[in-house]
Amino acid sequence: MGKVYIVGVGPYDEELITLKAIRVLKKCDVVLYDRLINKSILKYLKEDCKVYYCGKESGNHFRTQQKINDMLVRFAMDGYTVGRIKGGDPFVFGRGSEEALYLYEKGIDFEIIPGISSAIAVPCYAGIPVTHRMISQSFHVFTGRSAGKLLYDWSIVSKLTGTLIFLMGAENLNDIAQKLLQNGMDGNKPCAIISQGTSARQRTVSCALKDIPDLLMRSKVESPAVFIVGEVVSLRPFLNWYETKPLFGRKICITRPKKQSLEFKEKLMDLGAEVLEANSIKIKSTEENLEIYLAYLESYDLIIFTSVNGVEIFFEYLVQKGYDIRKIKAKFACIGDKTFEALKRRCIVAEYVAEEFVSESLYDGIKPILKRGLKVLLPRARGARRFLKDMLVKEGCHVDEVSLYEVLTESSAEIEMRDADYFTFTSPSSVVSFINLYGIEVLKGKKIVAIGPVTANKLEKYGLKPEVAFEYTIDGIIQKILSLEGYDV
């Protein structure tokens, strides 16, 4: 018999998931997920995890609740570890308790993983605290939608002195406002409507309670929406930290390999962007190709690395083989600050670093030391540009090129890229793999930023018109995006 985990993953922002939720998701064999979750959450699943969409929206249920209940039981009885992913918290209008009771009745072992509720997180992202000393000493959470009529005693609700929070009420906002007004609530009470909270498309509008009908006539409120009523809304002009970030409202798609995308992604998110990961390439080590060169490593005069991948795979292989690094007498050269730092972590300081992230720049830097008979080891990706090797040979150097890794196409979890604002590319191989996976149409009409001219040239061959980063680094890409957004960088 398996086990079911009912997992709350918080509202849309993927970083609001808990450590326990991540740990549980990593061991699931089967996962059923809801409509409103950020699909980036699915990256925590095992590669062979079976994933089922169970989205429900008003008037359109992809799977009925009974069907979902039965699937949970069937998979658990088959011995699987099952994850039931829910946005927000499973016990806050999430039907988590209904599903747990059904599992209990069927004798299925289950566990509930709480999540951050949109009732507090979404107002927070709009700069609205649900409580504030001397203004609101309580908050009250209501569903704004029900299978039947909302069964509240509005005469009591309208007289509550704390903050009122209505979830899932986009279709009933006017009715809710009218019920409050008709039962004596002050029409000048501040209120706010926050749609698509904690996402790049978050939109917040605020007004007095009596003006809700006019606001709804002027502005379309998209689901999901949180309706918040109370004096705490007046603090929004001072506490609006999220919507004032430089890249708030922008969706940016990055195409780096999964293992290398984290730093880039976090920097963009810190600036307020929502990041889509289309990990269109992955790195496959071919370290065994280094075997025949181990006995000769001490004879090389110069070893050149053109990427972090090359450094990591090279030295990890030496560790596996128990190779004594003190035997290496060569000088080291590399392309890029990240490659330089990767070498430093191996206690090696490269004598030559390309000023720009291209082979031409490295060649210009090392040209003064090149001479006939110089023995050079060039460990890098299979199919890399021939320029560097050709120029070294032309100078009379003896060059051994080792293919340490291959760049392969990798399909990411299904992500929605149609409304992305920017696409970024850090290598020609990522361009080819992305277009092979997702097609060129998704890029047309979008802003595209390439890390350097070589990557830009590959994009131009497909008829696209990319911008080029100021520096050939991920920081250079970010600076270019900020400049395109009108910031003085």
Image: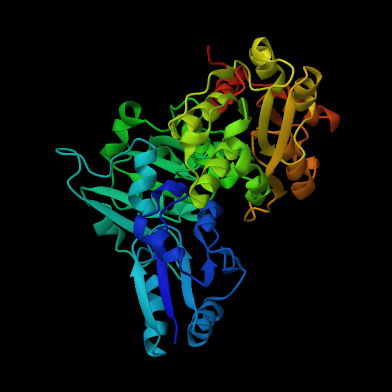
- Number of marks present in the image shown: 0
The answer to whether residue 337 is left or right of residue 422 is left
Which residue is the extreme one toward the bottom?
Answer: 106
Frontmost residue, 334 versus 474: 334
Residue 158 visible in the displayed image: yes
Residue 214 visible in the displayed image: no
Check the picture and name the quadrant holding the N terminus: bottom left
- Determine which quarter of the picture holds residue 19: bottom left
Frontmost residue, 377 versus 223: 377
Frontmost residue, 131 versus 314: 314
Which residue is the extreme one toward the top?
Answer: 368
The answer to whether residue 406 is left or right of residue 461 is left
Colour option used: rainbow
Q: Is residue 189 above or below residue 95?
A: above
Q: Position of residue 428 (x, y in %)?
A: 74, 34
Q: Position of residue 215 (x, y in %)?
A: 49, 37
| Point 60% across, 43% down: residue | 294
Q: Position of residue 405 (x, y in %)?
A: 67, 45
| Point 57% across, 16% down: residue | 486
Q: Position of residue 217 (x, y in %)?
A: 55, 40
- Determine which quarter of the picture holds residue 365: top right
